[in-house]
Image (spheres, rainbow, N blue to C red):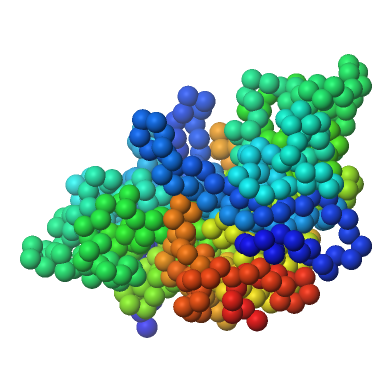
């Protein structure tokens, strides 16, 4: 029996930024993969490296100061990180669609939205010129914007934030991508509008079968949306698990603390866990566990050696020296 | 809301409670002007007839989406913005009738914690000076006594006395918010308006700040108006909750009643839209997806402000502004059809 086909396989990605204050170690050896049609959530706080990881894949980080020091990212049998820029351009917006947080700055304000969708179709597909408008209108309809033909003539400023984000999704979907990367796509939106966008994305899964990476700081947003979750901290993946398992049985003290610090709409009276201290400084390359200074379980090994992501079951991996379930060191 | 809402005791369930702040039918309209002479051509109805009481020692949560007027309501209560209409009383004294200097005398007793701890602290002042400034302004304590008070305040908010000599940029977002809180409690206030105090902070830091606010409330007997768009956090911290939409209050109730049995269709949709961090719960939850966007407060629809998105709207909703009525004990709703 053949294995489930992988769309993307990233191994040991290291990205740094050379700043006047020193080298920022933004991504420190990240490896993960994505199956065909799979929805993956990437959760982390600001500075955890979640956006830089995904933007490194398409070399969307400013270089310099940014530099991809190490790693491999195999997409569709090609390594994105060594690909010529000309060829990479065919991947960006073609086979991989990107949706950014702020739809106002990622749409061109002086072009109609119809033009911007058709531009993508012209560049990446061989749609005949006479069909471009119909195809653009169909995409707009797909993301739930009524009156599609009329809307194509609108400029971005004529639309609300939620509408603009839908247009961004339409642009990203224009070329039938195999993978859609969404970087905090609903963070700038109100909660009722966020619900609309999540509803559309869920719907797209049934219609298109695209794989999705959804980057967020909100553990709530991805809970009902994705199949698997990566938790990032200090530029590393600290835990990876199937979605139900991650929320039910978190194995990393950071994930556990994060879930405990979240108030829940459906519960009253729970105490919020205080994760003491601050997120780590990224100016030094981690030589020990970067969560150790904030961790209630930290012991001498955590200060000496940086734990690597290791599988504890088929559907669950964690980078931690402490076995919380058995209350003892994880190895030996 | 109409005049009747202003006259009734909005929360008749609180039997033993003393009203600290009473807001009665306040409106705040920002003029839209045009042309050389600034002719007024319209108004943004940021707050359009809001009434509620805040009891001593409680936390009233004020929730709503962007543009609902919740922050403006907070600013009008503290007289940072002048109300276009309506009254705000603090211990039965009408603030809107007072002169500037009279309000200033009451200022030590009502304070504010701002959303953005990066913008609300002067970068050229040390933390000690920032926290001590209200003491200087209101001539409370001097010299060593003042320094001792600053040290005490720093330790109350979980910082150390040695931090007094540092500048805001040396602190993280969460620590800066602690400094903002220390400044707010410096004069021993009774009442604090917390305007989105955690919105700019990382998730793991939000709980730290909310726990601090709760501890301080217990120790100092504070009363909070907690303004937020984070409905999960409001459920955690608030005793009662008011839901705003387009400058009006849609529903006001005890926190458990509001979250367990929301009566207004907007509250129902709003709550159902908030994701719960639990995939098993999410798998079975019903999400009400509202159509369209919030209308502009410069051009609100006639009748019920929610009628453009309401799943149960009828003709009546497009003509008549619904009365703010008490549907169940202590649960107030502005909807013709809620039951």
Q: How many marks?
A: 0
Question: Which residue in the rendered view is the most extreme toward the top?
Answer: B143
Which x, y percent locates residue B145? 92, 21
- Is B269 above or below relative to A213? below
Which x, y percent locates residue B48? 58, 54
Position of residue B253 in the picture relative to residue A192 (left or right): right
Quarter of the figure with the C terminus of chain B:
bottom right
Which x, y percent locates residue B118? 60, 34
> Can residue B271 be seen in this snapshot?
no
Residue at 45%, 38% in the rendered image: A16
- Is B146 above or below relative to B12? above
Residue at 69%, 39% in the rendered image: B79
- Is A294 above or below relative to B153? below
Residue at 59%, 79% in the rendered image: B337
Position of residue A94 in the picture relative to residue B334 (left or right): left
Quadrant location of residue B275?
A: bottom right
Residue at 38%, 38% in the rendered image: B34
- Is B45 above or below relative to B253? above
Quadrant location of residue B276?
A: bottom right
Q: Nearer the viewer, residue B9 or A247?
A: B9
């Amino acid at each position: 029996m053949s294995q489930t086909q992988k769309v993307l396989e990233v191994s040991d990605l290291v990205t740094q930024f050379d700043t006047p204050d020193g080298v920022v170690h933004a991504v420190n050896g990240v490896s993960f993969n994505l199956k065909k049609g799979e929805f993956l959530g990437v959760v982390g706080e600001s500075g955890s490296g979640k956006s830089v990881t995904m933007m490194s894949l398409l070399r969307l980080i400013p270089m310099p100061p940014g530099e991809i020091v190490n790693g491999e990212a195999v997409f569709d049998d090609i390594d994105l990180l060594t690909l010529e820029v000309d060829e990479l351009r065919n991947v960006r917006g073609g086979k991989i669609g990107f949706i950014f947080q702020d739809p106002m700055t990622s749409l061109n304000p002086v072009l109609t939205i119809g033009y911007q969708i058709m531009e993508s179709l012209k560049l990446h597909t061989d749609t005949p010129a006479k069909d471009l408008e119909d195809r653009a209108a169909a995409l707009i309809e797909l993301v739930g914007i009524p009156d599609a033909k009329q809307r194509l003539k609108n400029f971005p400023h004529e639309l609300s934030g939620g509408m603009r984000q839908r247009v961004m999704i339409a642009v990203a979907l224009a070329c039938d991508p195999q993978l859609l990367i969404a970087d905090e796509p609903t963070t700038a939106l109100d909660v009722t509008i966020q619900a609309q966008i999540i509803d559309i994305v869920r719907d797209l899964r049934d219609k298109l079968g695209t794989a999705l990476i959804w980057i967020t700081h909100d553990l709530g947003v991805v809970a009902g949306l994705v199949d698997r979750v990566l938790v990032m901290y200090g530029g590393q993946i600290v835990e990876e698990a199937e979605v139900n398992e991650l929320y039910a049985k978190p194995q990393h003290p950071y994930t556990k603390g994060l879930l405990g610090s979240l108030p829940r709409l459906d519960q009253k009276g729970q105490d919020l866990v205080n994760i003491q201290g601050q997120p780590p400084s990224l100016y030094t390359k981690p030589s020990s566990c970067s969560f150790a200074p904030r961790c209630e379980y930290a012991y001498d090994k955590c200060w000496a050696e940086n734990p690597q992501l290791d599988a504890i079951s088929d559907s669950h991996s964690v980078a931690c020296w402490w076995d919380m379930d058995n209350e003892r060191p994880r190895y030996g | 809301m109409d005049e009747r809402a202003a006259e009734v005791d909005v929360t008749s369930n609180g039997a033993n409670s003393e009203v600290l702040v009473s807001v009665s039918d306040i409106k705040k309209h920002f003029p839209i002007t045009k042309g050389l002479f600034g002719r007024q051509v319209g108004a943004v109805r940021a707050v359009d007839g809001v009434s509620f009481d805040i009891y001593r020692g409680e936390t009233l949560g004020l929730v709503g989406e962007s543009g609902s007027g919740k922050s403006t309501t907070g600013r009008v209560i503290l007289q940072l913005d002048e109300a276009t209409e309506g009254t705000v009383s603090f211990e039965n004294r009408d603030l809107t009738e007072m002169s500037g200097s009279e309000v200033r005398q009451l200022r030590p007793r009502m304070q504010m914690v701002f959303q953005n701890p990066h913008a609300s602290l002067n970068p050229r002042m040390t933390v000690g000076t920032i926290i001590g400034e209200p003491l200087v302004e209101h001539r409370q304590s001097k010299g060593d006594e003042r320094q001792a008070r600053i040290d005490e305040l720093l330790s109350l908010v979980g910082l150390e006395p040695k931090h007094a000599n540092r500048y805001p940029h040396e602190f993280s977002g969460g620590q800066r918010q602690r400094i903002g809180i220390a400044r707010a409690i410096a004069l021993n206030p009774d009442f604090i308006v917390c305007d989105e105090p955690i919105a700019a902070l990382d998730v793991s830091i939000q709980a730290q700040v909310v726990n601090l606010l709760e501890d301080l409330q217990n120790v100092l007997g504070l009363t909070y108006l907690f303004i937020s768009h984070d409905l999960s956090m409001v459920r955690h911290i608030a005793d009662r909750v008011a839901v705003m939409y387009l400058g009006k209050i849609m529903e006001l109730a005890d926190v458990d009643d509001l979250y367990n049995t929301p009566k207004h269709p907007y509250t129902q949709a709003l709550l159902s839209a908030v994701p719960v961090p639990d995939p098993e719960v999410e798998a079975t939850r019903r999400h009400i997806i509202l159509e369209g966007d919030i209308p502009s407060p410069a051009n609100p629809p006639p009748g019920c402000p929610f009628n453009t998105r309401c799943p149960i709207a009828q003709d009546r909703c497009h003509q008549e502004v619904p009365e703010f009525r008490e549907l169940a004990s202590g649960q107030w709703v502005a909807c013709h059809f809620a039951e």
